[in-house]
Amino acid sequence: MHRTSCGRKTVMMWCRGLLGIVILVTTLVVVYPQEGGYYTVKTVNGLRIVGLNTVFYYTADRLTRLLPVPAGQFTWLDGVLQDARNAGEKVMLTAHVPPGIKVPGKVQWFYERFNTKFLDLVQKYADIIPGMYFGHDHADGLKLLLKKDGTPGIPMFIAPSVTPWRYKSGTESDDPHNPGVRLVKYDRKTGEALDFIQYYMDLTESNEANASSWKVAYDASKAYQVKDLSAASVSMAVEQMSADKYVLDKHIRFNTVLANGEATVNECDATCRAKYICSFTHHTRGEFQSCVTDRLSNSLIG
């Protein structure tokens, strides 16, 4: 079903680098399609890792806007996940651009139909996907995809960027953020996320000293007071943030990688807080906006 050829020149360059370095360390089996920049690997511990090219679904990609299945990736992913389920494998999924809603700016990176299709597809295999990992936001994010019955499904972890570049749209831009690097701890057999440590560089301090200084921003399990980062534990963290202002305040500080002191927290009003809370589990524009409206209406009634 899947070809082992590396394909085009760009992919060949990555393939040689990956195979030359990674296989010597962990004896991974790498499977590349001919084109598309997506792949799957199976570790020596039996865990499957899938790397997707979600740039295909990004609204900045005008070439894929009208395509039903860009580069055949959805079809390929469905096949890989079904094969993994049949083989009793667990699958860690990683990509650059995340689905869902980025807050507090209320940005959806995916085209609407690709966002829905992606979420429906991974939700179908929630029983074998212990976690999904993304970047692109240049901010620290945490989300949870629920199963169809509303129970905890797949945690989504969005790591902040090393570059302090900020997203801009027209005259608006994101809040300033510090550079960040994340170290993830996971079970090598099941892929379940156990913890992560978020490191950061205080950009103002480093510029003044003319030298970089990396520090620990937080340890996720301690910060959110959970035993691990499984779907059940992330669900508990989401419930805490939804009910406890103090816990949500911590998450808001983390979002900018501790860049703005208390300003980010103090400037986050009721609407801003509703956006944060709704973004945890509502990943389409319609569901997200309904959630925000309901939360604000209930707070006025209360």
Image: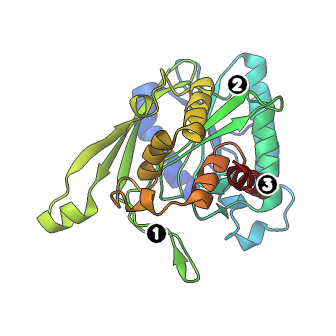
Look at discs 2 and 3 and give the one toward the viewer: 3
Residue 26 at x, y = what percent?
44, 26
Give whichever of 106, 57 is nearer the camera.
106
**How far apart, in angstroms, are the residues tagged by discs 3 and 1?**
28 Å
**How far apart, in angstroms, are the residues tagged by discs 2 and 3?**
30 Å
Q: How is the image coloured?
A: rainbow
**How far apart, in angstroms, are the residues tagged by discs 1 and 2?**
35 Å
Q: Quadrant of residue 285?
A: bottom right
Please give the name of the residue rendered at 74% of the width and 55% of the height, measured from the top-left corner. Answer: 297
Q: Does residue 216 appear in the picture of this structure?
A: yes
Residue beneath label 2, please? 128
Mark with earlier residue (3, 1): 1
Q: Does residue 31 appear in the picture of this structure?
A: no
Secondary element type, mark 3: helix
Q: Quadrant of residue 206?
A: bottom left
Say which amino acid is labelled 2. Ile
Please give the name of the residue rendered at 45% of the width and 41% of the height, measured from the top-left corner. Answer: 246
Residue beneath label 1, please? 166
- 43 lies left or right of 39: left
Residue 67, disc = none
Residue beneath label 3, please? 290
- 241 lies left or right of 165: right
Residue 24 at x, y = what percent?
40, 30
